[in-house]
Amino acid sequence: MLKKIQPNRLTCAIAISLSSLLVACNTETENSLDQDQIYASIDYDTLTVQAVEFTSQRKVSNVAVGLFDFDTGKKIASSLVNDKGFVNFDLVEDKSPYDIVIYRVTETGEWMEQTRKSFVFDKQNPLIKVQTFNVQSENPLSVPILMQNPELPHGCEITSLAAILNYYGITSDKVELAEKYMPSGKVTKKGNQLFGPDPNEAYGGDPSSQTGGYYVYAPPIVEAANRVLFKHNSNYRAMDLTEAPRDEILSYVESGVPVLIWVTIDLKKPRTNGNWIINGTNENHPIFRNLHAVVLTGYKKGKVTVMNPLEGNQSIDADLFFQRYKELGSHALVIL
């Protein structure tokens, strides 16, 4: 007579485990099929991003690019650009919003964000050009030549600012900047004594006047720049670099950032003639007669390249240039 075998706990456990495994496998297979069906149901396309320099549209080939979902901020993909500044991203959806981030790649391999652009992908126009800083370019930065004369014979600082803003694609008129954005104060005369503003707070006189215009230092130009940038909803901001050493100034240029910098108009030693008393104080301000502002755009083999609002593009001995910069008080600013 055969004995009826009762299933023990091990037998039951194995049976349950096998059953669970089969269910899990079936569920995973169904989920995989569902995921495949989802991907198959969406019409994906390829986005091509090209990094180019502001204004010149020259390729920028030593950067990285990240693609992000605009709504969630989640990174979708990232890659270095090729030698022509291009990178491709697959699995993008038509009419969907994204963010592109351009990164500067440091010598240690660190990625540092330098430009961000939001856009809605259009499969009919899959190429997106992103203007960015041209890091360590062999050529000077392509800051447009903008002359201060005849409208602003004493407006070198605000003209240089207008050139930098235009370089970044922010259309700016030098006269409008001078009249509406730059803080200024009158220079008046009582007896034989002149009275005027602190150049760190406002422009002295009228930059459009042949005889009644003087100059201004970095802080009021920074203020004017930031007012314009805010008006244009720009992510860039102006920063005062007063007293920055030579190496720091050049590091900005090598990172693709033009520098508005104060030197002497003839590259001779600073000359003063007379003074004014700063309004509301007893402090005398010596009046510089050969002060000038230019845009530093490049450095190579001991020479700096500048956009001079009186002369256009110039190449100048770097040692002499920075000597005059220092003698005038080391005034400079950047937008980044």
Image (cartoon, helix red, strand yellow):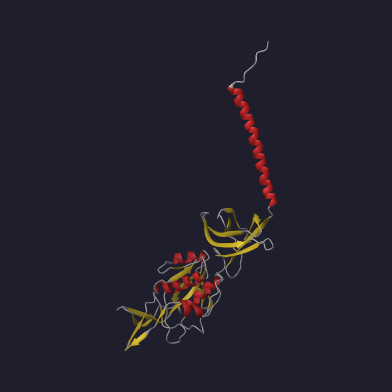
What is the quadrant of residue 50 in the picture? Answer: bottom right
The answer to whether 114 is drawn above or below residue 210 in the figure is above
Decide if residue 187 is in sight here: yes
Nearest the viewer among 243 and 117 is 117
Nearest the viewer among 50 and 123 is 123
Nearest the viewer among 8 and 215 is 8
Q: Number of numbered discs present? A: 0
Question: Residue at image x 51%, y 84%?
Answer: 151
**231 displayed left or right of 12:** left
The answer to whether 31 is drawn above or below residue 136 in the figure is above
Which quarter of the image is occupied by the N terminus? top right
The answer to whether 53 is drawn above or below residue 40 in the figure is below
What is the quadrant of residue 17 in the picture? Answer: top right
Nearest the viewer among 295 and 31 is 31
The answer to whether 270 is drawn above or below residue 246 in the figure is below
Decide if residue 320 is in sight here: no
In the image, residue 178 lies at what x, y percent? Answer: 47, 79
In the image, residue 146 lies at what x, y percent? Answer: 54, 78
